[in-house]
Image (tube, helix red, strand yellow):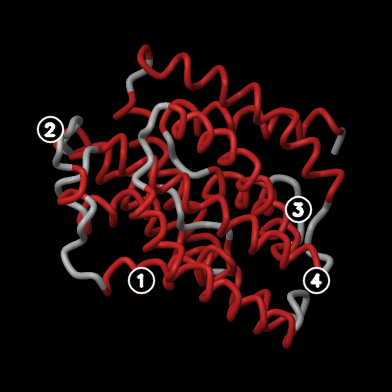
Amino acid sequence: MPDFAFIAAGFVVGLVVGLTGVGGGSLMTPILIFFFGVKPYLAIGTDLLFAAFTKMGGTISLARQRLIPWRVVGHLCAGSVPAALVTLYALHTFGPADESVQHVMTTTLGFALLLTAAATLYKAIRGKQAPRSLPAGHLGAATQPRHWTLPLLFGAVIGTLVTLTSVGAGAIGVTVLLILYPLLPLPRIVGADIAYAVPLTLLAGLGHASLGSVDWPLLAQLLAGSLPGIWLGSRLMARTPERLIRSALSVLLAWAGTKLVLI
């Protein structure tokens, strides 16, 4: 494939992320596997660093707007980072290129995409019902989860899922956080989801890089396309039919997930 194809793929994924907030991993990884024939372990490792760099920019922007509830981010990282380290240790032990390990990765990726499709469709139908603002002085109560163990457990599940598949910290994360923190406004939920994904995807991506599971030239081309795509998508967000785009995405993700599970 010519270099332009990878840049164009990065631009399209960046545009969709900017328009809808759906995680880039749920789109980029299946695109690399199905359309470019990239090995699953290389696609996952490369996409993890792709997600880390793209979400880093989003985190800086949200932090300047004071939309990130750092207490929630800390709770999630306390579960996700140790789980990522344990999963990386398992990958180091068995080897990511091992045929049985790749089968586990593709099957898990398929189920993760099906979950993301369901979460994306749920957000398209009911996402507007989430609170959009928070009364003054109520942030402390809003950042209290239903139970203190739930963010740790959820973080551990997402940490494992993201390290194995590069998918999980986007639509799935936002949907579950809406349940765990029902009083937290949607912009802060999105802020927490993007912010805690940065250390998680960076750690997991560097762990994959130490295994030789990152294609650095490919990563550079994807970022060259995605960064302007995100910039454009974020500016067109108010002019696009969000529910229609999310519904179409859920169908696409369900197709890709089903195909991966049946491999």
Residue type beneath disc 3: Gly
Choose the circle earlier in sequence order: 1 or 4. 1
Quarter-of-image position of residue 217 = top right
Numbered tag placed on residue 152 in the rendering: 1
Choose the circle earlier in sequence order: 2 or 1. 2
- Give the CA separation, mark 3 to mark 1: 36 Å
Q: Name the residue under label 4.
A: 211
Choose the circle earlier in sequence order: 2 or 3. 3
Residue contact between numbered discs 3 and 4, judged by CB atoms under 8 Å: no
Q: Give the image location of residue 117, x and y in percent.
A: 38, 50
Circle 2 Cα neighbour tier, 10 Å, few/some/many (<14 / 14–19 / ≥20): few
- Give the CA separation, mark 2 to mark 3: 50 Å
Residue 106 placement, left or right of 157: right
Choose the circle earlier in sequence order: 4 or 2. 2
Residue type beneath disc 4: Leu
Q: Among all residues in the image, which is located at the extreme bottom?
A: 93
Q: Mark 3 points at which residue?
A: 37
Circle 1 Cα neighbour tier, 10 Å, few/some/many (<14 / 14–19 / ≥20): some
Of circles 3 and 1, the one toward us is 1
Circle 3 Cα neighbour tier, 10 Å, few/some/many (<14 / 14–19 / ≥20): few
